[in-house]
Image (cartoon, rainbow, N blue to C red):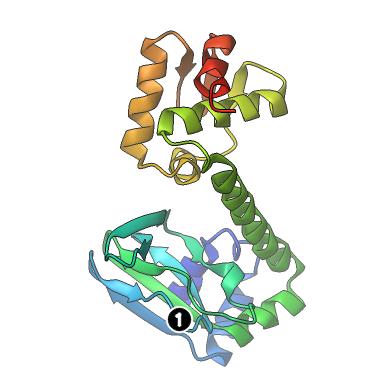
Amino acid sequence: MKRIAARLACCPAFEAVAPDTLRDLLQRHHYHLTSHDSGAIVAFRGDRYERLLVLLSGEVRTEMSSYGGKQYTVAEYTAPCLLAPAILFGEDNRLPVSVIATRPIELLRLPRAAVLTLCRTEEAFLEAYLGDVSTRLGVLADKLRLSRFATIRERLADYLLDQYHQQGSTTLQMPHSRRTQAEILGATRPALSRVLSELAEAGIVNYDRDYVQILALEALAELVDDLE
């Protein structure tokens, strides 16, 4: 119990909750703790989502499939994090994606009643939980906006131009991790890195882990202007 509470406290949504409170919560509510090997399907699209999934260790990806059976990766997540927090309180609380372990994982399933208890009694938890949901909605909005472009290069150019207009500078502090950037752009991280390298070789940008410097603003704009 103490070990689980300590692992749970590492998740950003729970880190402001006192350890004693987390241990008491786990004692009063019937939680499930499971381990899964890489490749295991831990939840299926269409499953009722009545327990909050908290990824305590490892990595997962979420997938959807076409009618023809082709699998599409929607997003990737690394522990510690919440999985599908916005679905838990939905009227139709069915998972829109399947969840697959990409590395060995440890997964905590918390009943909705336990989450509601924390929302009522722990303001910091409620704020963090809602912040997580809001951030994911923002990522989804960006993905929908960029979906009109056919290639990763075009989507990345539009994404960087949007950040340029928001930040008012050609030196951009990236608001998302490389993993989240790849999710927004509908790409894998290696594919995103390859396109960034191509733009750097063309003298359009410089970049490191957290920053992108736009060197040729007009050239970047030309990558998307023809599509408007």
Front one among 7 and 173: 173
Identify whether 165 is placed above or below 219. Answer: below
Expressed as whole percent of the image width and height from the top left, the position of residue 168 reads 72, 20
Identify whether 108 is placed above or below 190. Answer: below
Q: Is residue 92 left or right of residue 10?
A: right
Q: Is residue 55 left or right of residue 134?
A: left
Expressed as whole percent of the image width and height from the top left, the position of residue 211 reads 53, 24
Expressed as whole percent of the image width and height from the top left, the position of residue 158 reads 56, 29
Which quadrant does the N terminus fall into?
bottom left
Q: Callout 1: 10 Å neighbours few (<14), some, many (20+)?
A: few
Q: Is residue 107 left or right of residue 130?
A: left
Expressed as whole percent of the image width and height from the top left, the position of residue 193 reads 36, 30
Secondary element under disc 1, as helix, strand or loop, is: loop
| Residue identifier under label 1 | 1
Give the residue at x 48% y 74%: 95
Give the residue at x 47% y 15%: 206
Q: Residue flagged by tag 1: what amino acid is it?
A: Met
